[in-house]
Image (tube, rainbow, N blue to C red):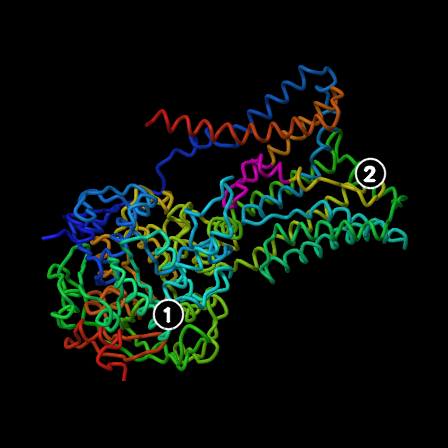
Amino acid sequence: MSDTQIRRIPDRLDNPLRSAIFSWQSLLLLVATAIFVANSLATPYFLNPWSISDATFNFTEKALIALAMALVIISGEIDLSVAAIIAFCSTMMGFALQFGVGTFGLVVIGITTGLLCGAFNGALVSGLRLPSIVVTIGTMSFFRGLSFIVLGDQAFKGYPSSFAYFGQGYVWWVVSFEVVLFLIMAVIFYFVLHRTSFGRQIFVIGNNPVTAEFSGVRVRRIKFLLFCLTGVMSGLAAVLLTSRLGSTRPSIATGWELEVITMVVLGGVSILGGAGSIIGVVLAALIMGLVTFGLGLLNVPGIVMSIVIGTLLIAVIALPILAGRLRARMER
Amino acid sequence: MPWPKLTLTGISKSFPGVKALNEVGLELYAGEVTALIGENGAGKSTLVKSLTGIYQPESGEIRIDGNPVSMQTPYRAFELGIAAIHQETVLFDELSVAENIYLGHTPRTSFGLIDWRKLRSKARKVLDEMGAAHISEDTQLKELGIAKKHLVAVARAMSIDSHIVIMDEPTAALSHKEIEDLFTLIEHLKSEGKAILFISHKFDEIYRIADRYTVFRDGEMVGKGLIKDTDQKKIVQMMVGRSVDQIFPKNNIKIGAPILQVANLSHPTEFDDISFDLNQGEILGFYGLVGAGRSEIMQALFGITRASIGSVTLDGKQCQFRSPADAIKAGIVYVPEERGKQGIVADLPIYQNIGLPSLHKTSHNGVLQLAEEFALAREFTERLDLRASSLSQATGTLSGGNQQKVVVAKWLATQPRVIILDEPTKGIDIGSKAAVHAFMGDLVAQGLSVIMVSSEIPEVLGMSDRVVVMREGLIVDIKANDGTLTAEQLVMTAAGIFGAAA
């Protein structure tokens, strides 16, 4: 045996093109296309630029949060307080409105409130090392409760007309401000998660936090930043939603946390942490938006919609697992 | 001649890359204590697991009173009257003492519900009989200390009327007084005619309680006999006996000035008053029994646990590491003993594991540069002769030895000054062991300094320039490995035999 000859180890063996074709993202793309075709066959009103543009409003705000939530879940944590943060941010904006704060000030207040809420979550999780599921169930009630204390059964109204642009404006023809913002954010999040060392460390933490710590990754600092980021994105969503609705009620965005998490999981992010992709989350957001809008055009009631979404989630998650098991059995 | 209570013959068991047991035999006699002696990795635990139905040996025969039996499941072992008391008791903290004793064979009422009154009175009776009257059957287990938990485990063994009791290092976590109590109990079990297998590293205990001994080394049975006929030195020799085919590539490196100085490092519970120097180009061995506090000291040096007092000086500069990131930046790295949990990220590819602590070097302004990551990973895996199909292979699919090479490569890529190896060859095959040893020689040749925590005596003697011997959180002695140091001296110092502690 000669050990003088150095053994060459190849970088990779699999064909990147081949693995892209058989990936989760392609499955989602297939599902999205199928739903698009089904929608256009089911109703004549769907294939119309304005209809499709309207369809996007169903998911852009939630999808913005889903981008950040994906990072949190990949790192092995979860944030259930995002909808409550929206309510609190919206309430703070409405509160500031009473003192004559202008459009720019409202946006700053909305996003800053989100940041502070996220930092609060992050401090409890990273600083006190509490489990995030418990912390954010707590802050979910806490932030929502604060909104109810401020507002009672009242509503804040009378936002300035320039404020309406964020949730109702169009950048060009049928292309809304919300869609443009979401696409820009999706590109940024894609870059951060898949192309930076920060993103790499998120995957490492989600896979094995102990090894991460032992390898010099500042685990708690990164987790704190991710909760702050989720807070900021929730604040941003609050600005868009408040602008679109033109009013603030304490019950605003109720139940959104589960829809956001559904998007993330449907997008192929492992709920156990350590795996996932931004492209998957974007496609999952698209699918959920198309399904709800299509069903809406068919006058299907909301409760049935949630049944359809739930079934879709289980089906899309279960199919590849079942297929994998079947393949394993055939090979044996 | 009557059959012993339990007879094992020709038991073999292998794991990927390792032959854990090779045709070993063992006999246990009723009313006698047999000590099973061997270094870490000699195959003692594998034997216990084969005896209790957790592992299935590939070959060999188990006989009870001369009748061949098969042991497919732990429940079968239980039915055959074999009870094991493990190092870390496997009991249920949230249940009461009585429930723990009768778990799996709880008395039931005619409706099939738990008969609480009977359960408690039976548990009481068992505890009283074995002289554990001070333990209440209603206490929740988590309120008991480790010694009392052991007593509950013994009570459980008594309750199933087992004839064979296995004790796997039962004294490891006990105080002196508690050990005395345990020995009284063992005497009681002996008088009841139980056959007892007693596993321990501590020779004073073995000579105190055992009637017979069996010695294992590297998965083979190397000797057995009666304790009263055998000299302690002879057993130590059997236990460590160096095999001739192991060659250690220790180069002659010129040892330089001290690079790392540790003074009076203390921790409230794990270690106390630790002082030593590490010189440039030196391999400093840390030898001691499991639980002597060696890993804890290393983790304090690496910024994972915080020492309460004491100082660490690197290159003449006082250091205070608040996290591993600080230690890595200063040039101290740590290859942990728990490779799977602390060393690798199993699902991520090799190149990402290796590049992890060097990300700030390979990335530009935080943006990943895959080409540079691959180049770095290739450089260090080829130096270590890693066997992998590609650098994108998930690290967890490699063999133990190759996983260890990934961890070592990861740290070398950071260009450290001091590398701490904690049981660097534990659980890896012979070939990879040799590669790791060869590499340690190369490291010091390049001017690095190495701290090697090891429980394997041949490795300690073969690689170290000096050996720090530890016992129960204290440094007992620092010995120069000048060729006169013997395995026997190390074992005796670490175990505190012959007053060597002084």
Q: Secondary structure at mark 2?
A: helix
How packed is label 2: few (under 14 Cα within 10 Å), some, or many (20 or more)?
some
Give the chain of mark 1. B
Q: Secondary structure at mark 1?
A: loop
Instruction: Provide residue A320's location: percent of width, then percent of height.
Output: 48, 29
Residue A176 against residue B227 in the figure, above or below: above
Q: Which residues are magenta?
A: A261-281
Instruction: Check chain identity for marks 1 and 2: say if they share one.
Output: no
Instruction: Provide residue A75's location: percent of width, then percent of height.
Output: 54, 49
Q: Is residue B131 visible?
A: yes
Residue B267 falls left or right of residue A3: right
Q: Is residue A287 magenta?
A: no
Residue B416 falls left or right of residue A263: left
Amino acid, disc 2: Leu
Q: Nearer the viewer, residue B154 or A268?
A: B154
Q: Is residue A280 magenta?
A: yes
Q: Which residue is mark 2?
A: A245
Q: Nearer the viewer, residue A203 or B359?
A: A203
Instruction: Provide residue B69's location: percent of width, then percent of height.
Output: 22, 42
Q: Locate the C terminus of chain B by quadrant.
A: bottom left
C-alpha span from label 1 to label 2: 68 Å
Q: Which residue is mark 1?
A: B174
Amino acid, disc 1: Leu
Give the chain of mark 2. A
Instruction: Provide residue A188's location: percent of width, then percent of height.
Output: 60, 44
How packed is label 1: few (under 14 Cα within 10 Å), some, or many (20 or more)?
some
